[in-house]
């Protein structure tokens, strides 16, 4: 039986990683490759490492454990604070954890002491996006407490923007993070080796503004999908098709465009609006909302997504397609995240020998230039963590 699958081109991921590592190295910034969207795939992690990322990061302890079990020895960072009960697992698989609560730090201290190691901490700072992190005014006090805690060491400061509220990384908020790092070093007499400015949404800032003390970015979406999360536009020179969702057709029939009979709530709330357009070819692919975010799919040319239930993707196609015909879709971050998590979507790996350099048409290039020039006026879309 043919199942929906994601085809992963490892060479394109390696290319994207290398391109971003090269560009950021000129700004004094290392890259942490983030694997959470691919469930800690060791193969994708190895492609990132081959592309030159300094370390790997993931928000799920299970994924970090999978990387270690696969024999990956690169430095690993836990990108979400563990609970106190998870401290021992965090210390066992990661060298660094992002933290913001003293109780968690104490649990990590106990776990590290039990294992006879020193565990690194990146203290997260809230800079306006209202996800995780302590307020700037509380950073010094908490950092002082961390510096006195045995078996852990304050390895740096971090922040996260453009995730919950869509706050754009800027000279102001990145400058505030840099100033806090300098303050802590002066007050506590220590050196902070990692100042992690944020995620893929930081790229536009990093390419045009002085980096200050920021020397690390945690990149997932930009490496995997080759786009800027603030605008969803392709990043110059990067592949946007390293992941392709392939789904078989299970029905393709001529049908009317409006329903017949009284209507109420559909499976996922209000039904999709429909207008009378006569008869169309309605094609169903064997995937649904349980497996993928249908709003994040880019269908093949001439095909449009009409609706999705839990296990059916309803499409309009130019002509009837035989059952079993495979359709290929592009994915955005939300669609990739959900599809990689579904047990009903399999993954296949490929490595093109010599991936072509991606080309950007002149119209897209002009849009990119305009977006970069006017970034301060852009209101970014709120999205999941990248």
Image: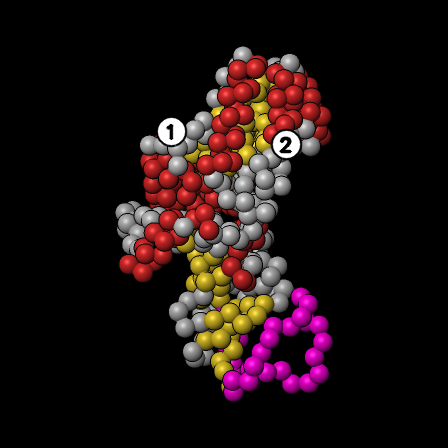
Q: Quadrant of residue 211?
A: top left
Q: Residue at x 62, y 41 (%)?
A: 130
- Mark 2: which secondary structure? loop
The label shown at residue 364 is: none
Q: For the residue carrying disc 2, how many other residues have a C-alpha within 10 Å: few (<14), some (14-19), or many (20+)?
A: some
**Image position, residue 101 (x, y; %):** 68, 28
Q: Hey, which residue is sitting farthest bottom in the picture?
A: 278
**Image position, residue 27 (x, y; %):** 36, 32
Q: Which residues are magenta?
A: 249-278
Q: Is residue 7 above or below residue 110?
A: below
Q: For the residue carrying disc 1, how many other residues have a C-alpha within 10 Å: few (<14), some (14-19), or many (20+)?
A: some
Marks counted in the figure total 2
Q: Residue at x 36, y 56 (%)?
A: 367
The label shown at residue 28 is: 1
Nearest the viewer among 345 and 54 is 54
Q: Is residue 166 above or below residue 211?
A: below
Q: Residue at x 41, y 43 (%)?
A: 204
- Residue 185 visible? The answer is yes
Q: Are marks 1 and 2 in contact (CB under 8 Å)?
A: no
Q: Residue at x 66, y 18 (%)?
A: 145
Q: Quadrant of residue 123?
A: top right
The label shown at residue 135 is: 2
> What colouring does the structure picture have?
secondary structure
């Amino acid at each position: 039986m043919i199942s929906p699958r994601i085809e992963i081109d490892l060479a394109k991921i390696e290319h994207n990683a290398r391109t971003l590592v090269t560009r950021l190295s000129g700004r004094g910034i290392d890259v942490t490759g983030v694997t959470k969207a691919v469930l800690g795939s060791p193969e994708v992690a190895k492609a990132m490492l081959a592309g030159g990322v300094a370390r790997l990061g993931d928000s799920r302890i299970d994924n970090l454990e999978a990387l270690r079990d696969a024999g990956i020895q690169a430095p690993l960072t836990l990108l979400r604070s563990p609970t106190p009960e998870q401290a021992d697992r965090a210390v066992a698989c990661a060298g660094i954890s992002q933290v913001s609560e003293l109780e968690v730090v104490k649990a990590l201290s106990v776990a590290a002491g039990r294992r006879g190691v020193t565990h690194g901490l990146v203290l997260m700072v809230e800079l306006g996006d209202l996800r995780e992190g302590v307020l700037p005014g509380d950073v010094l006090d908490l950092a002082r407490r961390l510096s006195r805690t045995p078996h852990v060491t304050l390895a740096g400061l971090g922040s996260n923007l453009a995730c919950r509220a869509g706050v754009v990384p800027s000279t102001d908020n990145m400058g505030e993070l840099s100033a806090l790092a300098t303050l802590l070093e002066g007050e506590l007499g220590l050196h902070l080796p990692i100042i992690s400015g944020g995620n893929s949404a930081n790229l536009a800032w990093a390419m045009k503004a002085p980096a200050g003390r920021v020397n690390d970015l945690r990149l997932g979406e930009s490496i995997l999908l080759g786009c800027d999360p603030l605008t969803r536009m392709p990043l110059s020179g990067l592949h946007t098709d390293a992941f392709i969702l392939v789904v078989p057709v299970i029905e393709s029939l001529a049908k009317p465009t409006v329903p017949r009979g009284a209507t109420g709530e559909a499976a996922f709330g209000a039904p999709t609006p429909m207008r009378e357009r006569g008869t169309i070819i309605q094609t169903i692919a064997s995937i649904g909302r349980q497996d993928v975010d249908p709003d994040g799919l880019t269908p093949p040319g001439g095909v449009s997504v009409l609706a999705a239930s839990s296990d059916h993707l309803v499409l309009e196609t130019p002509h009837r397609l035989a059952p079993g015909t495979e359709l290929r879709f592009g994915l955005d971050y939300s669609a990739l995240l959900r599809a990689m998590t579904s047990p009903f979507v399999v993954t296949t790996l490929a490595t093109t020998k010599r991936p072509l350099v991606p080309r950007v048409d002149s119209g897209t290039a002009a849009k990119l230039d305009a977006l970069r020039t006017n970034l301060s006026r852009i209101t970014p879309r709120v999205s999941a963590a990248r």
